């Protein structure tokens, strides 16, 4: 017997109210609207009835994220087989007298609850497409490589694998590939290729987006361009990305992987900036990393003999750095890559005798962090608290940042200095499109500094306080940082973060998500109607 629609709706409503009554939203989320106690009859699209799940056995996995720092329980989880079902859920909320919050969750790799929906509904993006991957590569009959269409829920590792089947690959990558397309494009998607090709958001031709009104819109630089540019780097505030058309190029086969050791940050950054200026026959990937006197520990890149040599240098200087570079090539061009590398090394000022190389496949290089994950998970060292801090530092302030942060705070505390990975990655402003929502420093060269620390349940708050000290120190020193994967507690802080882009961003929010339904965990807009 088929239940009347209003009976089904009442069952769902009661289930959600009961679920929400079992949790109390944390103080940080007290302005967010829970699932309503009543819903107008006729608004519920019965297609989504069977896709909603309730109860702690379901919601627990969607109540926290990779950071393990924040917990907020949703009232329900939606498992949509299609984008149309997500749109139906959004329209339901938008049409309700008491709209509820909605968060799209991909791989859950945010660190401060950005993909949580306290007492609202989390959309499990992985359900899109069911068991069939939504990655389609378009290669022309003449051999021209056009693009890859990927669902917003797709992991970049799957985009890579399918693209390689056609001899092509996207140009820009994050260091970790088990992230979703929609997730990285909502932030920026940065890595060691960004200096040359820009972040991932600079390599997108077209998007399918579900707005905060439940409209399904295709947008590009020439069609609905305000939504296109607004969503890229827009932190999920303007819409849910369900498809992205991404630029590709012929895929390399091998990578000559290089690490060069430096004893001071100035030498490292000067060489990084030199490499940024080499437009032809330079590195295809550039990053940097800080090492403390603890040195290299169990690195698969270095031999035991090389590790001992580097550790001795680190013990002598307390802090050293390495520049990580990569040259991509085809198998039939091995001799040419040798010549390229030799020419580049002659231009650089690393410590003599401290250049280390390795040759690996293109896939292994791009997927290198996953190798660490495989090792750390069985040891219980992967799913631990991650009090991360990612900031963009202007080139003009990097020396000041070294003195006030690296020397005075980080390396002065040996326990925190050895707690994780410290990346220093150069960025070229010309490769970023200023029409996009993401906020960056107003200088031609800036550095993405990532303090990627792991902690215990007892220690993460101390490291988090240290992150706050770093931010406060930079503010007092007038170092104009921009947070990446940002987290702020007030709208005033968000306004300062976006700076001259704030007014436009707020206008787009009012146009495409006027009831502030989407991505409540970002804590940018929490009022019922954006003004």
Image (tube, rainbow, N blue to C red):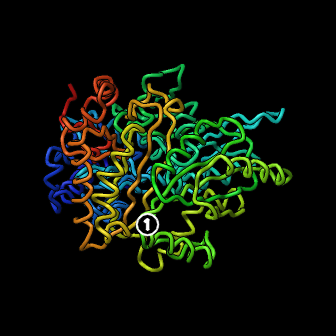
Element at badge 1?
Answer: helix
| Residue 2 shows up from this direction | no
* In-front residue for pair 466/148: 466
The residue positioned 47% from the left and 46% from the top of the image is 184
Quadrant of the drawing holding the N terminus: bottom left
Whether residue 379 is situated above or below residue 502 in the rendered picture = below
Q: Residue at x 24, y 74 (%)?
A: 458
| Left or right: 278 in relation to 521 | right
Residue in the image at 32% along x and 49% along y: 114
131 sits left or right of 231 in the view: right
Question: Dividing the picture into quarters, in which one does residue 356 lie?
Answer: bottom right
| Residue under numbered circle 1 | 317
Depth check: give the residue in front, 444 or 249.
444
Residue 496: image location, x then y, percent: 25, 33
Q: Is residue 404 above or below residue 314?
A: above
Q: Position of residue 485 (x, y in %)?
A: 37, 47
The x and y percentages for residue 185 are 47, 41
Q: Nearer the viewer, residue 4 or 428?
A: 428
Direction from residue 470 to residue 377 in the image, left or right: right
Disc 1 packing (10 Å; few <14; some 14–19; many ≥20)? few
Q: Is residue 27 left or right of residue 135?
A: left
Which quadrant of the rendered structure holds the C terminus? top left
């Amino acid at each position: 017997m088929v239940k009347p629609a209003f009976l089904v709706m009442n069952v769902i409503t009661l289930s959600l109210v009961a679920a929400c009554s079992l949790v109390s939203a944390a103080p940080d989320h007290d302005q967010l609207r829970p699932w309503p106690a009543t819903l107008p009859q006729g608004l519920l699209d019965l297609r989504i009835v069977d896709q909603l799940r309730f109860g702690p056995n379901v919601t627990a996995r969607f109540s926290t994220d990779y950071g393990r720092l924040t917990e907020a329980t949703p009232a329900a989880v939606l498992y949509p087989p299609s984008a149309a079902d997500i749109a139906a859920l959004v329209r339901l909320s938008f049409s309700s007298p008491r709209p509820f919050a909605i968060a799209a969750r991909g791989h859950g790799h945010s660190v401060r609850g950005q993909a949580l929906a306290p007492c609202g509904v989390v959309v499990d993006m992985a359900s899109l497409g069911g068991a069939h991957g939504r990655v389609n590569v378009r290669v022309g009959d003449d051999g021209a490589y056009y693009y890859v269409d990927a669902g917003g829920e797709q992991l970049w590792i799957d985009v890579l694998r399918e693209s390689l089947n056609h001899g092509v690959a996207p140009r820009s990558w994050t260091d970790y590939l088990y992230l979703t397309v929609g997730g990285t494009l909502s932030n920026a998607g940065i890595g060691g290729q960004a200096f040359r090709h820009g972040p991932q958001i600079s390599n997108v031709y077209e998007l399918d987006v579900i707005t905060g009104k439940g409209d399904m819109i295709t947008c590009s630089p020439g069609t609905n361009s305000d939504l296109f540019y607004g969503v890229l780097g827009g932190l999920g505030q303007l819409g849910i990305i369900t498809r992205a058309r991404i630029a590709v190029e012929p895929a390399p086969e091998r990578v000559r992987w290089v690490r060069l050791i430096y004893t001071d940050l100035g030498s490292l950054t000067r060489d990084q900036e030199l490499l940024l200026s080499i437009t032809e026959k330079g590195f295809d990937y550039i990053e940097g990393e800080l090492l403390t006197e603890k040195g290299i520990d169990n690195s698969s890149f270095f031999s035991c003999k090389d590790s001992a040599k580097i550790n001795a240098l680190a013990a002598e200087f307390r802090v050293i750095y390495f520049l990580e570079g990569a040259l991509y090539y085809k198998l039939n061009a091995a001799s040419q890559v040798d010549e390229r590398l030799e020419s580049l090394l002659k231009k650089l000022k690393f410590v003599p005798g401290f250049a280390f190389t390795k040759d690996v496949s293109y896939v292994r290089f791009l997927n290198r962090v996953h190798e660490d994950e495989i090792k750390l998970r069985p040891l219980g060292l992967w799913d631990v608290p991650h009090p991360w801090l990612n900031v963009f530092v202007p080139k003009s302030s990097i020396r000041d940042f070294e003195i006030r942060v690296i020397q005075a705070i980080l390396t002065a505390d040996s326990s925190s200095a050895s707690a994780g990975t410290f990346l220093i990655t150069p960025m070229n402003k010309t490769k970023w499109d200023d029409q996009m929502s993401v906020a960056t420093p107003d200088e031609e060269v800036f550095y993405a500094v990532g303090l990627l620390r792991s902690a215990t349940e007892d220690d993460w708050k101390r490291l988090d306080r240290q992150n706050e000290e770093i931010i406060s120190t930079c503010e007092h020193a007038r170092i104009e940082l921009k947070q990446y994967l940002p987290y702020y507690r007030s709208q005033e802080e968000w306004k300062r973060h976006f700076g001259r882009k704030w007014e436009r961003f707020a206008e787009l929010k009012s146009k495409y998500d006027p009831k502030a339904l989407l991505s409540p965990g970002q804590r940018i807009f929490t009022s019922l109607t954006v003004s």
